[in-house]
Amino acid sequence: MGIRFVYTALQVNDIDASEKFYTTILGMQKSVRKRVKETQGEMCVLKSGANVLELNWYDDAAVKKGDNLDHLAFEVDARGEFRRLMRTLRAKGIEVREYLETEGWNRFFTRDPDGNSVEIYVRKGG
């Protein structure tokens, strides 16, 4: 029997803000968004290539500010796109922090609307 990682699920305070961040800023595609009767909440499934992120909102739940997640990582294809994304985030008042340039790649971190850490990187040569 094989075990494989399927998706990451984040509990969010504002599903609209989180969906907008991951689709508009980070280019993920919405697969499905629906109410979930069993949880009295709502879910939104986002895709980036073969990777899936599920956003979950529950009407009566308090969300911690990113305490239980280390970070999510997104790779961009080209250095120009990497720089454009940094400019876009800053223009929207979203903090870009911990920029690092190495021999093989460049990366920075930011935070989503719920305080979860998000890494953006580009490989050199891209």
Image (cartoon, helix red, strand yellow):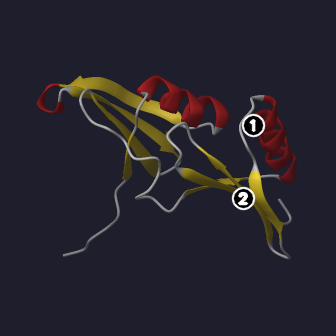
Q: How far across and how far down the image is residue 38, in percent?
A: 12, 31
Given the current orientation, which residue lies at the most extreme left position?
38
24 w.r.t. 120: above or below: above
- How many numbered circles does the render carry? 2
Amino acid on which the number 1 mark rests in the picture: Leu
Secondary-structure class at tag 1: helix
Crowd class of label 2 (few under 14; some 14 to 19; many from 20; radius 10 Å): many
Tag shown at residue 58? none
Q: Within the image, what quadrant is residue 97 found in? A: bottom right
Tag shown at residue 89? 1
Q: Report which residue position mark 2 lands on.
A: 121
The reply, left or right, for residue 82 in relation to residue 73 is right
User: What residue is rendered at 44% in x and 56% in y?
Assistant: 67
User: What residue is rendered at 80% in x and 37% in y?
Assistant: 90
- Residue 45 visible in the displayed image: yes
- Residue 123 visible in the displayed image: no
16 w.r.t. 39: above or below: above
Residue contact between numbered discs 1 and 2, judged by CB atoms under 8 Å? no
The reply, left or right, for residue 115 in relation to residue 84 is left
66 w.r.t. 22: above or below: below
User: What residue is rendered at 81% in x and 66% in y?
Assistant: 100
Quarter of the rendering occupied by the C terminus: bottom right
Quarter of the rendering occupied by the N terminus: bottom left
Amino acid on which the number 2 mark rests in the picture: Tyr
Q: Within the image, what quadrant is residue 101 found in? A: bottom right
Depth check: 85 or 97 in front? 97
Q: Earlier in the sequence, mark 1 or mark 2?
A: 1
Secondary-structure class at tag 2: strand
The reply, left or right, for residue 115 in relation to residue 60 is right
Q: CA distance from mark 1 to mark 2?
A: 14 Å
User: What residue is rendered at 40% in x and 37% in y?
Assistant: 12
